[in-house]
Amino acid sequence: MKTTMKKISAFMMACCLLISLAACQGPGAADITNGSVPSQNVAEQTGDTLPVDDTQESASHAFDTGSEATSAASPNHRPVETVKPGSATTKPPKQNQKPSTTAEIVAYFNAAANKVKTEKPGLTKTEKISFQVQGDSAIAGIANQVQKALKNTLNPDPITVKKGASHNAVFPVENQSWASRLSADAVSSASCVEKNGAYLITIRLKDEHISYEQAKKPLQTRHGQVVDILKTSEIEEQIKDLSWLITVHDLDQTYSGTTITCTVDKQSQKMRSAHYRIISHAVIQASAPLVGDTTVNATLTFNQEYQF
């Protein structure tokens, strides 16, 4: 199964189980609070989205060591969505010149990320997915049980791609020949630190609301220019097999706290490692037997580690 389809499957299975199990608890348990969605990660229970410094710390080990992946895989391909490049950023600095401004850092990152797709160095991808559902104690308890039941789906085995094979299906942006068209005006902060012959780059994206309609054309969103978002077409494809259990009427997403940290070799300007942390606050309006119409507020966190 393709990487993104695993995400969608995990997400929709979680929603279906939550709604169906809530029905067994009675009307009280099926009432989901419609207030603001919390930004904490269930796996960490910190109460806040991950600060940039914490993400830097997560990538620092790879920054100091680095590794290469040479295992074989046969990535799948999908039709490429036509999209115009985002707002132009300044050109990256000349080789061996450290990028300093936000525009320079973003341009430098874009060039290094796109090299992954064109030069195909070989990679290993590790992904962990967690979610939190807002509601009363019964709903929270059910959510914890669902995460345990979906442990293998939410934490799939690492994916490896050998050197020279297509990286398009595994490295963001999925199924495109390019990896990033991020623009500086989509970034809330960017930093670049030099250490051991490499640059440690940390980029935090601005918050972005993406409606169900906008998710039909993900490459026209700011997040969709650099990370893989939940797409309307993939959600609908999964829902077809679950139509007897759940009908989704709307699904709004707000991406908040998305952070990318990577190490780039100073001489070759090639990525050594990368960490993408994507946080989606989703509001799902759905209906199901016994429950009727309901609104589920969920926070999904995707942690994606790449070693080249």
Image: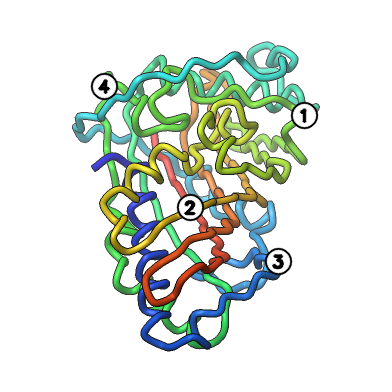
Q: Mark 3 and 2 residues: CB-CB less than 8 Å, in contact?
A: no
Question: Tag 2: residue type?
Answer: Phe
Q: Earlier in the sequence, mark 3 or mark 2?
A: 3
Q: CA distance from mark 1 to mark 2?
A: 23 Å
Q: Which residue is mark 1?
A: 185
Question: Tag 3: residue type?
Answer: Ser
Disc 4 element = loop
Residue 95 image point, x, y percent: 63, 13
Q: Mark 2 and 4 residues: CB-CB less than 8 Å, in contact?
A: no
Q: CA distance from mark 4 to mark 3?
A: 44 Å
Residue 16 image point, x, y percent: 37, 65
Q: Residue furthest right?
A: 101
The quadrant the N terminus occupies is top left
Query: Is label 3 or label 2 in front?
Result: 3
- Residue 236 falls in image quadrant: top left
Question: Which residue is drawn at the image coordinates 45% and 44% (left, top)?
Answer: 65
- Residue 193 falls in image quadrant: top right
Q: Earlier in the sequence, mark 1 or mark 4?
A: 4
Query: Is label 1 or label 4 in front?
Result: 1
Query: Is label 3 or label 1 in front?
Result: 3
Q: CA distance from mark 3 to mark 1?
A: 26 Å
Question: Tag 4: residue type?
Answer: Ala
Numbered label attached to residue 36 = 3
Q: CA distance from mark 1 to mark 4?
A: 33 Å
Query: Is label 4 or label 3 in front?
Result: 3
Query: Is label 2 or label 4 in front?
Result: 2
Q: Which residue is mark 2?
A: 302
Q: Is residue 33 left or right of residue 10?
A: right
Q: Which residue is mark 4?
A: 165
Disc 1 element = helix
